[in-house]
Image (tube, rainbow, N blue to C red):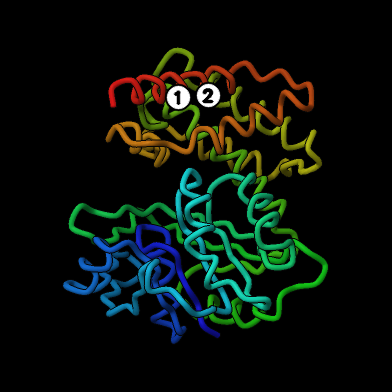
Amino acid sequence: MRILVLGAGGIGGYYGARMHAAGGDVTFLVRLARAKQLREGGLNVFSSFGDLPITPKLVTKDELSEQFDVIVLSCKAYDLESAMESIAPAVGKQSVILPLLNGISHIEKLQARFGSEQVLGGVAIISVVLTPDGEIRHLNKLHRLIAGSLTPSPSQWLEPLAQLLSLSNLEFVFSANVEQNLWDKIVFLSTLAGSTCAMRASLGIIMETVAGEAFITGLLAECARIAEASGHAVSEAQLAAYRTQLTERGSALMASMLRDVERSGPTEADHILGDMVGRAQAKGIDAPLLRITYSHLQAYALRRMAEN
């Protein structure tokens, strides 16, 4: 089984390195600058679960000319169109794509481009950053990866991929209902990103404000109603766990989207919060807190565009 990982940033670099260390035949599709950096210093992952300095196999877009069995997508959602163009030469009739993007809307776009049978569901639950010098730093104890088939007929590569991931020193879940897992994550992520970006602070700081807890729990409730109306209700037990995590006093947790804002970079607001707002409108659900948080990030994007 030959695996192509698009990108060697935080997500792709971490999971790709874990699969490589477990004996997987992994190649990273990277840009020229990242290829130069990796050829000079290797791919270096620093984690409490064990550091991984590896010498990765690399290919750039211009060099990609052969097909792979499994293609792992780890790009930002706003780069999806260019990512699909980049991986197209690697996708054969029997290939399967495992996307690890945030949100849900990317699934439909990938299925439209490559076919429903060739797209798996994937959920990455991890906090990692790519440092300016190219190192990957794992920030907490979470490094879960959930994968499963979105169609009744699983790809021939799903079982061997699951076996490899099970050996990769990470928390792997082979899901029978990965679409629900995707919805569970977007409910949590929309709440986390919406609250921390709107308040420009960690959860712990937000909880110290006069209306912080009500804002967080209200936003979570709106997102949960959207999921339920869409046929993917989050279980009460899962919602309770989310509520506990999102309202933890002293928590330093914040969304990676806030780090994007703080460095004046592009964000996935349209693909996460904007998508949820659109689904709420389509279902006739009033979601004022969600609309305000999305408006906040739209204003940031408009100002950024004007300044650039």
Q: Residue furthest top?
A: 210
Indicate the position of residue 184 as horizontal and vertical percent values.
Answer: 65, 46
15 left or right of 134 in image: right
Name the residue that disc number 2 marks.
294
Secondary structure beneath disc 1? helix
Residue at image coords 55%, 19%: 214
Name the residue that disc number 1 marks.
297
179 left or right of 200 in image: right
If the image is split into quadrants, where does the C terminus sit?
A: top left
Indicate the position of residue 253 as horizontal and vertical percent values.
Answer: 39, 39
Indicate the position of residue 164 as horizontal and vertical percent values.
Answer: 54, 81
Please name whichever residue, 230 or 253, is drawn nearer the observer in this view of the structure. Answer: 230
Say above or below: 118 vs 290: below
Residue type at mark 1: give it: Leu
If the image is split into quadrants, where does the N terminus sit?
A: bottom right
Q: Quadrant of residue 256?
A: top left
Say above or below: 206 vs 48: above
Say above or below: 286 vs 76: above
Secondary structure beneath disc 2? helix
